[in-house]
Amino acid sequence: MKFPILELNKYFNSLDTLQGIFSVFGDFGVGKTTFALQTAMNSAKLGKFTIYVYTKPKFPSEKIILINKDYNDILDNILFIQTTNFNELNRIIFNFEFLILNYLNSNKPKLELIILDSITNLYRLELNKDKKEKNYNLNYQLNQMLANLTYLNEIYGIEILVINEISRKALDDQIIAVQSGGSVMKFWVNYNLKITKTKKLNERKFYFTSISENHTIEFISNLREKGFE
């Protein structure tokens, strides 16, 4: 995986693959999709075949062109899938292994990166505080989806990048921002990258945490028309 942020690439250059799930989260408009698309296209330029699953109604085709006007040169290395249904997203994730095995038994390039943008958007749309049983089933599905993605990472060495939303909860009389998906995401995610806005219009602050190392670093990047730089 090749990130658009130099500090992240420095950290991961020594690793053959990401060990587990990498989650990027933040408020609306901070640049999560831009970050994910840049990562997908940077990786594709290196010859890494990537599946990019997009779960919102308007596919970001204009953003793709802005980021890389020569994107047609790398389309052979990226498969874009769009869905706006949570159950369909669940089926897509559980069909990844069949796709992987199909690619392994053909002359097609090896699948090396899966990006889900976003993992919880459709999940949150389905939640209903008055339907506890439905919410329980949704949490179960989300848990199984993340378990399957972890399995793909461990067994096939496929890097997993998920884009996530922000939820807010009360803690010690304060309202704090956390990843959507709560304890389910906390259990399965190995790396967190929180993106926040600053007082400067185009400036973004990043908080990267490696869960296993219990280590967090902070850095700044600017978000331009063509992406982060």
Image: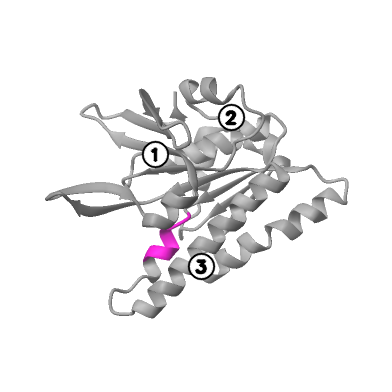
Closer to the camera: disc 1 or disc 3?
A: 3
Label 3 crowd bin: few (<14), some (14–19), many (20+), radius 10 Å: some
Spatial CA distance of label 2 from label 1 is 17 Å
Magenta segment main secondary structure: helix
Residue 84 seen in this snapshot: no
Percent coordinates x, y for residue 218 in the rendering: 35, 25
Label 2 crowd bin: few (<14), some (14–19), many (20+), radius 10 Å: some
Residue 67 seen in this snapshot: yes
Percent coordinates x, y for residue 32 in the rendering: 42, 41
Percent coordinates x, y for residue 229 in the rendering: 44, 23
Q: Nearer the viewer, residue 10 or 53?
A: 10
Amino acid on which disc 2 is placed: Lys
Residue shown at 53% from the left, 20% from the top: 10
**Above or below: residue 20 compared with residue 87:** above
Which of the numbered marks, if any, corresponds to residue 141?
3
Residue shown at 69% from the left, 41% from the top: 157
Q: Nearer the viewer, residue 86 or 209?
A: 209
Which of the numbered marks, if any, corresponds to residue 31?
1
Pick whichever of labels 2 and 1 is earlier in the sequence: 2
Q: Considering the numbered disc 2 on the image, is that residue within a helix, a strand or a loop?
A: loop
**Above or below: residue 115 compared with residue 35:** below
**Which residues, given as a range, are shown in magenta?**
119-124
